[in-house]
Amino acid sequence: MSRSARLGGVLRAGALLVGALMSVGPLSSGASGASTPAAHAARTISLNETGHLHLTSKHNYTLNEQGSASGTVTGTIYVHLTAVSTSRVTAEVNIYTRGASISGNGTASYRRSGTTASFSGSLSIGRGTGSYAHAHGSGLRFSGTIQESRNDAITVHVSGRVSD
């Protein structure tokens, strides 16, 4: 094998070794030898959402609704609203944006007046994905109306502070 062929092979092997080391990432000089995770800068978001939803399905005492969310986070909103008594509802709220989502659960008082019902209570944000991966918050205001005359269409409002 010629000297230039051997040198080319050594350079390729060296490049492969450097590439392999770079893919492992930086090594810590700490006693454990583990790498230090990158710090996550906390931010607080003042969430103020309005959703206009239509009924997608109904099962027992649960209305499954989908629509558009506008406000701080825009995208598609899904609400699963369950009547747990004649005066209380629970809800699961999911908002999906391009490449991210934010989800929470709430409880509210519930009151009917003719073909319209209203609810008002609180919501907690417990999870998210993408840019909202660390989202959490509690005590958010959660309210809305249900229009039986419009096939159980819901208008929902969520507001409060969420940390991410």
Image (cartoon, rainbow, N blue to C red):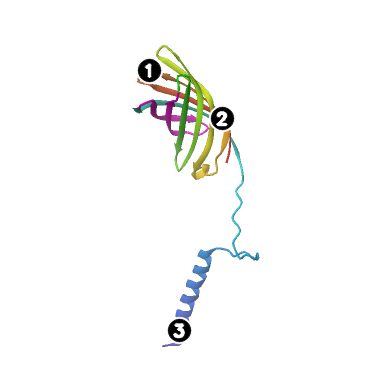
Q: Please tell me how many numbered marks the rendered image carries.
A: 3
30, 85: nearer the viewer: 85
Q: Residue at x 59, y 63 (%)?
A: 34
**Distance (Cα) linking label 1 and label 3:** 81 Å
Decide: few, some or many residues near mark 2? Use Cα within 10 Å; few <14, some 14-19, many ≥20: many
Sequence-earlier tag: 2 or 1: 2
Circle 1 sits on which residue?
148
Q: Which amino acid does label 2 sit on?
A: Leu
Residue situated furthest top in the rendering: 114
Mark nearest the camera among 1 and 3 is 1
Q: Where is residue 163 in the image (x, y as percent from the top left)?
A: 59, 38
Q: Mark 3 sits on what residue?
A: 6
Main secondary structure type of the part rendered in magenta: strand
Mark 1 closeness class: few <14, some 14–19, many ≥20 residues within 10 Å:
few
Choose top left, top right, bottom left or bottom right for residue 112.
top left
The region drawn magenta spans 59-84
Residue at 58% from the left image edge and 63% from the top image edge: 26
Pointer 2 residue: 140
Q: What element carries label 1?
A: helix
Image marks 3 and 2: residues in contact by CB distance under 8 Å: no
